Image (tube, coloured by chain):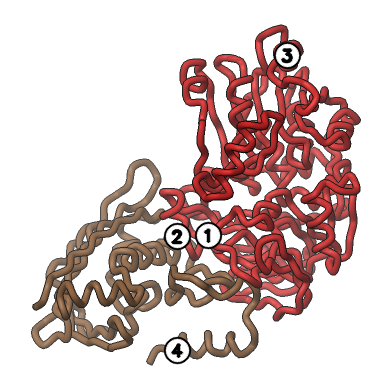
Chain colours: A red, B brown
Amino acid sequence: MRANCWMGVNTVEVQDVPDPKILNRRDAIVKITSTAICGSDLHLLDGYVPTMQSGDILGHEFMGEVVEVGAGVDSARLRVGDRVVVPFPIACGACAQCRRGLYSTCENSNPNAGLAEKMFGHPTAGIFGYSHLTGGFAGGQAEYARVPFADVGPLKIESDLSDDQVLFLSDILPTGYMGAEMCDIEPGDTVAVWGAGPVGQFAMDSARLLGADQVIAIDREPYRLRLAADAGHTTLNFEEVDVRSELLALTAGRGPDSCIDAVGMEATHGSSHLNTYDRVKQATRQESDRPHALRQAILCCRSGGTVSVVGVYGGFIDKFPAGAWMNRALTLKTGQCHVHRYMKPLLERIEKGEIDPTRVITHRLPLSEAPHGYEIFKNKEEDCEKVILQP
Amino acid sequence: MEKTVDLIATTTVGKDPAVVYAYWRQFDQFPEFMAHVDVVRTISDTRSHWQVTAPFGRTVEWDAEITEDVPGRVLAWRSVEGADVANAGMVHFSPAPRDQGTEIRVTISYDLPGGKFGEALARWAGEDPHQQLDDDLRRFKQVMETGEVVRSEGAPWGKRSRQEFPQHPAQPLSDEELIDLTHAEVPA
């Protein structure tokens, strides 16, 4: 089959690779009909996630048709012919973390758990196409994918919703939603969202759905801010205005009740000296992540408010404003999304028309043009917000 | 110059102590999750024969006998005279708080051939016994909670998957690699 492979920093190639095979009794093989490039794939492309190997198949947002199931798959849950969306974390559904609903910290789905334990203190779940630290699972930017614990994760789509409408249930819609849910929003709240990429857009839409009065998008790309404005959100371009002053103005001096970091480890920002500091430290491997959005979110949030982090971090950061966080009674919440627990409720919201996930799609490319998709998405060319790949 | 090595590892398994104990009591299932244990053959209710791969691909064998057996709570065994490597093991099973199943505490002791030098040499060859026992227990938990040892394209070898790099790339195995995988799983 054809698959998009990571070949080294800044290089992806669509190659011929063997077709996937059942390796565990509860595996299924899915013939992929739609897949997407995620902002977090850019962290892999840029070389900021360790334990990538040349030839690793990328992609953790995919859906398609079940074409084969292992002998151990519960046939009441999944059968050949089912149309499914696959959640990006791989979860067993049986361990203590899964039973708590914390699927992205599944204790049983990462064959390289010993390695993850050394990096993070405790192991994390397997993730499709996301380095060997998260298991070394082949990803879904391909014609087929093997899906472990297939009777736990995949969500069956039994209505006639299009791929475009449901594909993002695999990651970015639940991730944005969880970002907003962690804010415990109350009526009258203002929620500020750093990053107007796809996850940021869905965090904004979700914040509005969960009752926020005012939702503020912070980014520097005019086309991304326009997309947020078109959805009814207030926008701030951090290259044109002082973010903290503007946020204070928009909340009469209180600051946002909650702040969402939908940026993560490769933030850019207007403050040139701090940006240079982080870039130099990151380039020389003294700091693995550039946390500007997180720092600013903490400084801007109202006292007693919540800072919710769904942007991806991989290692260590400098200049964490611990004083602001502690003295102003802020709550910091985070996590890779526990996609499994959000898929069904969000599917219902899509069916009712409460959320339109298709609004972020700007590009549709054949799988063979995946490298071009990565390039325009990374460099923010052609007003690229979200690339869908079709095998 | 022999040196006794003591390894201690713990895990929590989401099943009742009686169930976890009963599975552990069937020593012949050890090869499923213990990386270096190739075969355990039950000789009688208290005696078993073990065949284990030691560092540098050597095979060592011994007979073991159960020395303490309190169903649902404690199980201990040790090798009898004539073992290639004298060793002993003990497992304590206790109920975990709330509904979290069973806490397992394992101690394995063995006389390391070659003493400190042998240990250093084994480490150099990529064998860290503490990490191995942790990983063995992790796989035991996987088997108990999910029915089998999880595999990925990068680490398709189940219990023989090592934590070192490079691994197999995260792309499907070729037919030849798959045949190797199947053959390697038939015990000697």
- The residue beneath circle 4 is B186
Mark 1 vs mark 2, CA separation in Å: 6 Å
Q: Nearer the viewer, residue B58 or B35?
A: B58
Secondary element at tag 1: loop
- The residue beneath circle 2 is A115
Same chain under badges 4 and 3? The reply is no
Report the residue at 61% width, 32% height from top. A274
The answer to whether the residues at label 2 and label 3 have Cβ atoms under 8 Å apart is no
The answer to whether the residues at label 1 and label 2 have Cβ atoms under 8 Å apart is yes
- The residue beneath circle 1 is A133
Same chain under badges 2 and 3? The reply is yes
Mark 2 vs mark 3, CA separation in Å: 45 Å
Secondary element at tag 2: helix
- The residue beneath circle 3 is A188
Chain letter of disc 1? A
Quarter of the image for residue A37 reads bottom right
Report the residue at 40% width, 76% height from top. B32
Residue type indicated by callout 1: Leu
Chain letter of disc 2? A
In the picture, which quadrant includes the N terminus of chain A?
bottom right
Mark 4 vs mark 3, CA separation in Å: 65 Å
Q: Is residue A380 left or right of residue B76?
A: right
Q: Is residue A98 left or right of residue B43?
A: right
